[in-house]
Image: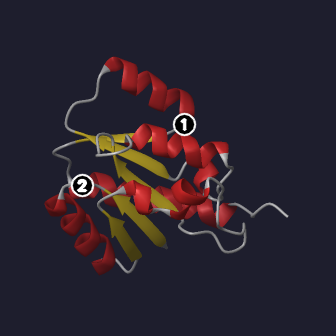
């Protein structure tokens, strides 16, 4: 599976990239979500049958744009298969407001520090959702 990690903390990015690559996934990580094509083009650059990523894991607080705003932009553009719920937000400090917003959007969240097994389990669930889904025509 293709996994995109967005986190301005190089330690978290490296940990997730290394661990998920060792599990056989293709992992790309960015420290700045504004490097993602959607934010520069303002429309999803991916075709449904050839999406940019299968799973997105993003930090909630990053320079230039918050993880929730980034995810909201992706969902508004209908990026496939992020619409499947294969999106998670990470944060060391999740307020009730953020948790409610994430729940309303169908976004999973992890509190930092997290256990890698939590991430592995969730990525396995993402794989199952992806296998059961069909891209839109």
Residue 95: x %, y % from top left: 29, 22
Helix, strand or loop at mark 2? loop
Q: Which mark is residue 78?
A: none
Identified at 23% across, 58% down, the residue is 116
For residue 26, above or below residue 70: below
Q: How crowded is the residue under tag 1: few (<14 C-alpha within 10 Å), some, or many (20+)?
A: some
Helix, strand or loop at mark 1? loop
Answer with left or right where residue 81 lies relative to residue 53: right
Q: Which mark is residue 8?
A: 2
Identified at 33% across, 61% down, the residue is 120
Residue lying furthest right: 137
Q: Which residue is mark 1?
A: 106
Identified at 53% across, 64% down, the residue is 37
Identified at 28% across, 55% down, the residue is 7
Mark 1–mark 2 distance (CA, rounded to whole Å): 23 Å
**Number of marks in picture:** 2
Q: Quadrant of residue 104?
A: top right
């Amino acid at each position: 599976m293709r996994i995109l990690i967005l986190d301005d903390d190089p330690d978290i990015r490296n940990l997730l990239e290394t661990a998920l690559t060792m599990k056989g996934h293709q992992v790309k990580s960015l420290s700045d979500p504004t490097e993602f094509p959607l934010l520069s083009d303002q429309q999803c650059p991916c075709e449904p049958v050839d999406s940019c990523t299968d799973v997105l894991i993003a930090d909630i607080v990053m320079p230039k744009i918050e993880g929730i705003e980034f995810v909201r932009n992706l969902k508004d553009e209908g990026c496939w298969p992020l619409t499947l719920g294969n999106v998670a937000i990470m944060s060391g400090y999740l307020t009730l407001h953020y948790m409610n917003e994430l729940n309303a959007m169908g976004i999973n969240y992890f509190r930092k520090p997290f256990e890698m097994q939590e991430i592995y389990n969730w990525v396995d669930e993402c794989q199952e959702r992806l296998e059961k889904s069909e891209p839109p025509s």
